[in-house]
Image: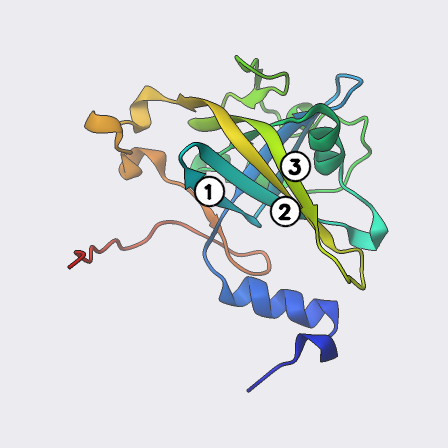
Amino acid sequence: MEFNPEELDQKAIYKLITGAIIPRPIGWISTISEEGIPNLAPFSFFNVIGDDPPHVMFSTAHGNQHKKDTLNNALATGQFVVNMVTEEIVEAMNATAQSVHSDIDEFELAGLTPLPSLKIKPPRVKESPITFECEVVHHYSLENHKYGGATMVVGRIVMFHFDEAVLLEDHKINLDVYRPVSRLAGANYSKLGELFAVKRG
């Protein structure tokens, strides 16, 4: 079947995209407002975009023409932290996905421990074994939208934090210890599952 996105409503497009493009890594983004209030929220429109120098991106939709606190904070301060999500903290991550007033601290809401970052102001999630301190270098808002659109934020990683338990020799990651979680469609998430290797020619 073929679908012309110009002829579909937003809900149908969202279901097709999020059901087909899987699994998606989760960028659990912590920011801080100009008033000093921490914010924490997960985004599955997230990924790494380069390593020279290291950059990541996340995108946030503007539901009902309303920009999320994460976007407002990141653009206002120019900083954010990516906290990677594991099996042990997926429930806490889910608790921070709910929409709450901007003066609510999601760290407290989810029972998480904020840790000071080294180079930027937003705190990190202590319970996350891998976190990236980032500085905003670019943002782009989708054009010609019908329902509010979305904004992509690109950040340069200025500091890596890795729990020693997830590291092997030569900067490799111990997946048995790391146990990352990724996003599927609806309320579904996935673990790594069976791994296989394909050698490059």
CA separation in Å, label 2 and label 1: 12 Å
Q: Which residue is mark 2?
A: 59
CA separation in Å, label 1 and label 3: 22 Å
Q: Residue at x 55, y 27 (%)?
A: 134
**Outermost bottom residue:** 1
Residue 8 drawn above or below residue 167: below
Relative to residue 35, is residue 184 drawn left or right? left
Where does the C terminus fall, quadrant-wise?
bottom left
Q: Give percent across and percent down for residue 45.
A: 57, 50
Secondary structure under tag 3 reads loop
Residue 96, numbered circle:
3
Q: Which residue is mark 1?
A: 48
Relative to residue 83, is residue 111 drawn left or right? right
Relative to residue 69, is residue 171 drawn left or right? left
Q: Nearer the viewer, residue 57 or 112?
A: 57
Question: What colour scheme does the image use?
Answer: rainbow
Three-letter code for the amino acid on which mark 3 is drawn: Thr
Q: Nearer the viewer, residue 44 or 151?
A: 151
Residue 104, numbered circle:
none
Q: Is residue 18 visible?
A: yes
Q: Give percent across and percent down for residue 128.
A: 47, 28
Secondary structure under tag 1 reads strand
Callout in the foreground (1, 3):
1
Three-letter code for the amino acid on which mark 2 is drawn: Ser
Q: Residue at x 51, y 21 (%)?
A: 126
Q: Give percent across and percent down for residue 115.
A: 55, 15
Three-letter code for the amino acid on which mark 1 is drawn: Val
User: Mark 1 Cα within 10 Å, few/some/many (few <14, many 20+)?
Assistant: some
Q: Residue at x 43, y 41 (%)?
A: 50
Residue 80 drawn above or below residue 17: above
CA separation in Å, label 3 and label 2: 17 Å
Callout in the foreground (3, 2):
2
